[in-house]
Each structure stands twice: as structure tokens, then as C-alpha cells.
Amino acid sequence: MAEATDLLYQLNQQSRSLFQERQVILSFSGFLRKLRERPIPLIRNSSQYLYDTFNYFGRTEAGSGFEDCARWKVFDIGTHKNVPIVGSEGVQDEIYKVITGFVRQGYSNKLIMLHGPNGSAKTSIIESIGHAMQRYSETEDGAVYRFNWIFPTDKSLTSKAMGAVGPIGFTGMRDDDSSLREDSFAFLDESKIAAKIQSEYKENPIFLLPMPQRAEWLKKWISEDTGVPEAEIEIPQHIQLAGLSKRNQLIFENLLAAYDGDLGKVLRHVQVERFFFSKQYRVGIGTVEPQMSIDAYEKQLTIDRSIANLPPVLHNISFHEAEGPLVEANRGILEFSDMLKRPIEAFKYLLTTVEKGSVNLPSSTTNLDIVFFASTNEKHLDAFKTIPDFASFRSRFELVTAPYLLKPSLEQQIYAQDVKALAKSKPVTPHALEMLCLWAVMTRLKQPNPDYYDSKYRALIARLDPRHKVRLYEGESLMPLFKPQEEATLRELRRAILDEYQNVVAYEGRFGASPREVRSILYRAVQNSKYTTLTPMALFDELERLVKDRTVYEFLQLEPRGKYHQPQEFITVCKRDFADIFEREVTASMTLVDEEQYETLLSRYIENVVAQVKREKIYNKITGNYEQPNENLMRDVERILKVNGPIEKHREALLGRIAAFKIDNPVAPIVVSRIFHEYMDTIKQHYYEEQKKQVEDNFKVMMVLGTDEAKNYKEDDLHLATSTYQNLEKRFGYPRDAAYESLKFLLTFRSQQASS
């Protein structure tokens, strides 16, 4: 019991400390002091606040995609589920540019519409922005305030007559009370409050200051804060407007009249309250679902307890309370989810609401301060473009394309949490997710049109198949299909290849397998009782099943173009990739040759080539002398690499490749096995071919290990097979069952290839 009491005491102390530190409740004079100290942050509108949110969290120097733009860290924070946005740097940067435009013009007058295929993270991107706003509002830099009207319980005095001097129904008020005093009802105990009226629009308390004094004071304070002369200070346009809602304006005017214009006495009734953005509680962050048709409405308050306890001077006011997503989202952001699924009549009001920043209600027209977002899929957008009113809507939209990802390495990151969850019920083997994401990305690619490029590149572009287009996007080697010089040319054209389908209706990444479908394949594959682990083979089985149902998935209905739009063939490509990868891994696990020997040989070769091209000598650590490059070594390696054509040109190209790497990666160390990884694979394959008989014999033993048939093999053979399994698990992460299934797949696949 004592322990529980101590815990509650600590919690209470922490809560009070945080409450006081954040200064959640202020009097109006307390708010003015803050305003004078930091005038610019406290007069921000929603677009400026969103702009500052982006800049508060900052950005990284380079994104993970192809775009020449940075990655904003608000998308690393993720959504309320703490899931970061993978890739999509181009989408993020476009949103930032639009918001920057709003800031420069002083208001947001367009709706930011994210459009793209289903599952391209449109909603998640908007949720991430909202979550970042929530986090920012919890910091001192991001503090935002609204206000409430407070009326005490003591009603012993009646309203004063017009022109008379005295209180209007509250004790303790004297004729010399003024706004300069610290006296305020803001800190009254709840038991002493008769009525509390909240501002449903969360208006900035600064609008309680009348114009032109509001602008004059702000100019002076901003000048003192920034050092800029008052004459050069421009007060934001939204601050110069009448920013109060009709209800708050009526309360203000009636109190001011009752107090004979004593603004100080009016402001004693103001309780300034710090608020925090929240999607869950609909504070400054709202969502309008497709099925919702009413985004703002109001109701008259008649029997509300707070209304009944108001002083008589306010009884002549017909109180209305506004509600709905538009009201809840004021001073923040509002998302129209799948907006174009709604009937057009349901959002025609947006033409004026977004452009003018106001909403018409039965009893009033209220100014809004909202950055509007929307999401829609391409089908609905295509249909929307055909209506006569589209031109009117288009001028009020900022369209931002959100395509599928085009790099498997990024696609894999989407399912990191899924794989983590699945691994609790069934082990996930290496390369399973990699193969699935490779297949998904290949379904999204479009065939390059050679006519789009200069005539000297057309033949090269025509040879670029889906698998090598993925490799190009990933920055991987294109050899042996393309020679080193051809590969260098394609790398130079990568930006143009990516841009070819960026600004067209059928852009690259509009069609193909969606992340939702990929995720469902993962979860179905893990339930496949045929496999004890989640292997690439289990996923291949699911993919084979999926591609047979062309009526369900739109991307399966696309007509093949060359080697593109062929999901069935892409499964074979993935199988071939996995067979190659596993073959290298199982061979390396046999430890017939130390892995370091491959890298040592390649490093020595490159070192000699560089010295030979530069006409330099190489320092021999053993003899301590400088010696000529070893021509025999270079010739031996070049025979292994099967170099054709002039040797000198080949060697110069290697030096050029190193130089290109240093230009692209100025601070990265030179690791030859990475820069020339295809040569590394060729060298490994060469030694594999030399020991092919021993490797194939070991495969046979591995397949029968643990059965009665294993008795037919020698002890050394059994030991090699056992150690290979152990190394596969230790070095590459294959459980014994998964290694067996993978080896079985490899042998079957190679047999099928040989027979075909």
C-alpha cells in the first residue's frame, strides 16, 4: 500500500511539474508577456506552423530514393503507430514546396491532393505530418494557445445600468480594476466558476486585442525582437482580420458595453489555455471519411448549464455551438480521405471554403485557418477529370503524385514490423522478403521507349529488361549483360530513364502489385504447412497462385510489352536470382577456399592495374623495394574474368570506375570487392567450377544427411555436409530445415533449366 502511495505521489509531482513548466493556463496579461517576448511564433497561421514543423525536425542531406532532394525527418517520426514512411522523398518535398508557397503568400488557398495507386502511403504521409505537429506542439517552440471565457459563481450583484459605475454581477470588482492588474478569473478554482465557455474554433487570444492597436503593438514588439525597424515590419494579413467567431465577438462586445469600454475588465474573464494537436482527440487535426457528408454544422444552446449560469448581461445572446471536422481542425490540418469517392455535391463548398478560408453556417460566416489535404486513387481522379466542373476544382488543387516504390531495398523496409511479428510464429529465412519485393517492383516498371532518347542510346535502352532496370535503380552492377562502358552510360542516363514516365498519366509506379497485396502474400505464405519456415519457395507458391487470377488484380490484365508486364515470368526471374544467391552461399559455406583469398586476389589485381595505368611502381612490403606491376598476375586474373578486346582499354576503364566512385562517394573508403562486386562473383564462380565435382558430391550428401542412405558415404563426406549446414546457419542465417528446402529447390531448378 505504501509503495502504491509513493508511486502516486511521484506521478502527482511529475504531473504538476510538467503542467507548470508548460504553463498550460495563463491569464491574458500572462499571454501578453509571452507574446511580447516571442511575438512571431505566437501569431503563426496554420501554414506557417506546418512550415516550422518541417524545419524544426530538419532534414537529412540525401534521401533514399533517386530524387535529388533531401528527406524530411518528420516522416522518420512516422504516424501515431510509430511507423516511418519509407522512401517517397519526392512526394515529401513537393508537399513542403506547396506549404512554402502558402507561407510566402500569407495564406493557404488550395487543397493539397495526394493521388496515386492504392497502398502508396498517401494517408500515412498525411498522418505523419499530423503526428509531427503533435510532437512539435509539445515543445516550447511549438506552443499554441486558445482561450476560454470564465464567469465566477457570485451573482449577488445585478447588471449595472448604462452609464453607471460598478460591477456587472461579480463581487470583488472595483472601479479602478484594469488590464494592467494581475487580477484574473483565469486561475479560479473550478468550484467558484459558474460558467466556462470554450472557443470551439481555438482562436488565437491575440484577436481579443482590437485593431489598430493590435498591429501597432506587434510591430513594436517584432522590431524589438528582430532588430528590424518598425517601418519595415509587415504584419501578417491574417492577424489584421477580425479573427473571432460570432459567439466570441458577441460575448466580447456585450461585456465591453457592460463595462463602459473598460477592456481590462473584459479581459479578466479570459483564460488563455495552451493546447496540443492530436489526431486521436481531434484537436487541430481532422479527417473526413468518404461516408461523411456534413463537415461543419451548428446547434443552438438552450439548456446548457454554462449558458444558464451566465450573467444577465449575456442573456440576450442566442448561443450556437459549431461542430464537425472543419471546426475541430481549425488552426491545423484537415484530411479528406478518399475524397473523390464522395458525391461531387458533398464537397462543392470546398471551392469557396478552401479559396476564401471561411465556412458559411446558418447563423454566421466564420474564418478558418486550415491547411487542407486530400487523398484519392487514380481511378477516381481519372473519372473526376471528365466532369464539366473539373477546371474549377483544378485551380484550387495542388496535385501531388504518390507512386509505388521502385526499389526492392526500400520496399522491404515497409514490412519490417510484419516480418518481426511473423518470425514469432515461424522463422523467416534469408532472401524470402527480398525475392517477394523484387517481384513486386518488377510488376510496377514500364518499358523504356528508345525513341525518347538520343539515337546513339536507343539500341542500349532497348536491351534494358525489368531485372536490369531494377539493378540500375538500385545502383547495382549490370554486368555481364552490359559491358563496363555500357553500364557507365546507363548510369549517366538513370535520371532520364526515371524521368521518362514521371509527368505522364500512366507514370511508372502507378500500376503493379500494391504493398497491401505483398503483405497479404506474406501472411498467407507463413500459413503454408508445406514449409516449417517462411522460405522464398513458400512465397513462390503464393505468387504462382496469385498470378492465375487475372480477374482480381488489375496489373495482371496489362498487355505485355517486350519483357515488361509479365508477372508470371518475373517469378522465374526471382527463382533464378535466389538459386544463384543460395548457390554462392552454400559454396562459400563449404570453406573450400577462404573467402578472404578472393578479396585479396582481386585487391592485388586492382592495385597492379592502377599502378600500370598510372605508370607507377608498387611497394613490396616483404622486400621493402618498389617494383614494376606484376603483368603475369594481371593476365591470370583477366583470363579468369574473360576480358575481351584491348587489355589497355579494359584497365583504363577500371581506373575510371574507381574515379567515378570517388566522385559519387567522396568520403567513402575504396573497397574493391564492392566497387567490382561482379568481378568478385566471377572469381568465386571460377574456383567453384574448378571444384564443381566436389561441390556437387557434397550437395548429394547434404540431401541424404540424417537418413539411412547417409551410411553409404565416408566419414569425411558426412563431416563436410554437416559443417556446410552449420556454416549456412552461422554465416547466413539458414535454419537446418530452410537450408535443406533451399538446396532441394536449387537442385530441382537447375535440373529444370538444364532440361529446357
Image: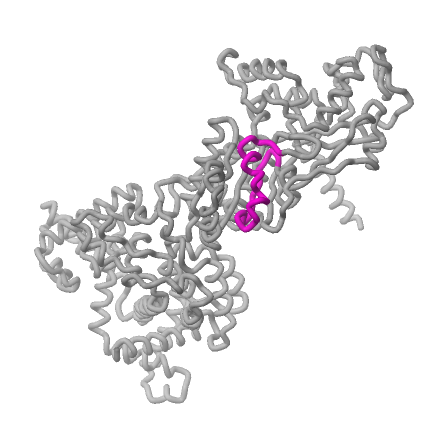
Q: Is residue 195 visible?
A: yes
Above or below residue 381? Residue 481 is below
343 falls in the magenta region: yes
Residue at 41% across, 86% down = 707
Q: Position of residue 206 (x, y in %)?
A: 64, 23
> Which residues lie in the magenta part?
330-359
Residue 684 is drawn in which quadrant? bottom left
Q: Position of residue 251 (x, y in %)?
A: 75, 24
Q: Position of residue 611 (x, y in %)?
A: 13, 48
Residue 269 is drawn in which quadrant? top right
- State left or right for residue 178 relative to residue 87: right
- State left or right for residue 637 relative to residue 436: left
Above or below residue 19? Residue 426 is below
Disc tally is: 0
Q: Position of residue 299 (x, y in %)?
A: 74, 38
- State left or right for residue 612 relative to residue 499: left
> 486 and 256: which one is in front?
256
| Colour setup of the view | one colour
Q: Quadrant of the C terminus?
A: bottom left
Residue at 87% across, 20% down = 171
